[in-house]
Image: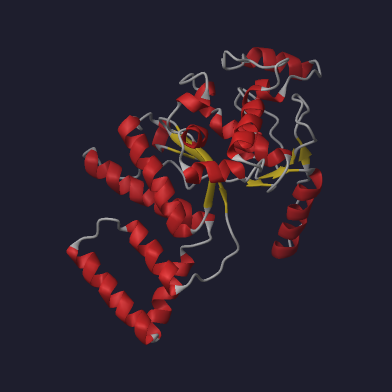
Amino acid sequence: MTRTVNGERILDDPAKEVLRKQLWQISDFCGVQILTYAILSNHFHVLVRVPQKQLPSDVELLRRYQTLYPRPTKYQCARLEVIQAQLATDGPEATEWRRRQAALMGDVSQFMKLLKQRFSVWFNRNHQRYGTLWSERFKSVLVEPQGRALETMATYIDLNCVRAGLATDPKDYRFCGYAEAVAGNTAAQAGLLSIPGGTWTEAQATYRQWLFGTADEARESGAPIDAALLEKVIDEGGRLPRSTVLRCRIRYFTDGAVLGSKAFVESHLLAYRIMTGRRERTAVRPIPPVAEWGSPLATLRSLRKHAFG
């Protein structure tokens, strides 16, 4: 997740449309899979699956390079011819070019950096402004790649428009992954399909149940939950349906660092300690069972103040 400078609501619909297109374009270049996303007026979320780093073939590298420049200038066309000639000779220039391109791929940091830089250039040029557009690098949460954590994070992101009062159903909000999938975007469908599996018809039915709950618990109005009500439930040790709680802002999903089962979070905490040689005081933090998560969820950071709101 990343936010505009000072949280200013400067992303209108045309800007969101450009960012949406660049999101898909740069994910293709970097080789990361977008599972879902949500773009709002002052921030955006994106859930991605990052593959293991490997060097693509020269043909694939050139295809991805051309993805970044779908309408190249004369200079860029000439440069592409030079690159192709260098690759044909397989000399030191070709090796260096492959290295530079590979360094931008299979890395969430490079993906976000390239996306934010490209969009900033477009936005500043078209709005007669200069300087930084984003308030920070970006916030990231490592999510367990299967099970309740992944499906909960995906639905939380798609419900951003509902929490913001922009729509009562994510399918009606153009700038989110679920709406694109419903509209027929094959890449968006593939991203969501990778979570529940099955055919698109089956996956869509399952995903809508995650978004709205079962018939007994559904909040078909799609209205954001009252934060005071949620706070009361927490204080009294009660529980609400997951689909209800996800209509509230939950900082565990943006500031928790790692999200998943207790075993998953513990394994990454141990790996961090081994890598850095540091003995951290922190421990695995279970997310309060205010919702019927399906299975216990944990994070790496304790968020005692305003974790829900």
**In the image, is 222 to the left or to the right of 18?**
right
Which residue occupies 46% across, 52% down?
Answer: 27
From the viewer's side, name the closer residue of 76 and 111: 76
Residue at far left of view: 74
Which residue occupies 46% across, 41% down?
Answer: 185
Residue 26 placement (x, y as % from top left): 42, 53
Q: Is residue 294 above or below residue 131?
A: above
Query: How many numbered discs sit on the rendered protein?
Result: 0
Q: Quadrant of residue 50?
A: bottom right
Q: Is residue 266 above or below residue 205?
A: below
State whether residue 306 appears in this view: no
Residue 74 placement (x, y as % from top left): 18, 64
Which residue occupies 27% across, 77% down?
Answer: 82
For the rendered model, the colour scheme is secondary structure
Q: Is residue 297 above or below residue 67?
A: above
Which residue occupies 60% across, 15% down?
Answer: 220
**In the image, is 101 to the left or to the right of 309?**
left
Residue 262 placement (x, y as % from top left): 80, 44
The quadrant of the image that shows the C terminus is top right
State whether residue 271 appears in this view: yes
Residue 297 placement (x, y as % from top left): 76, 37
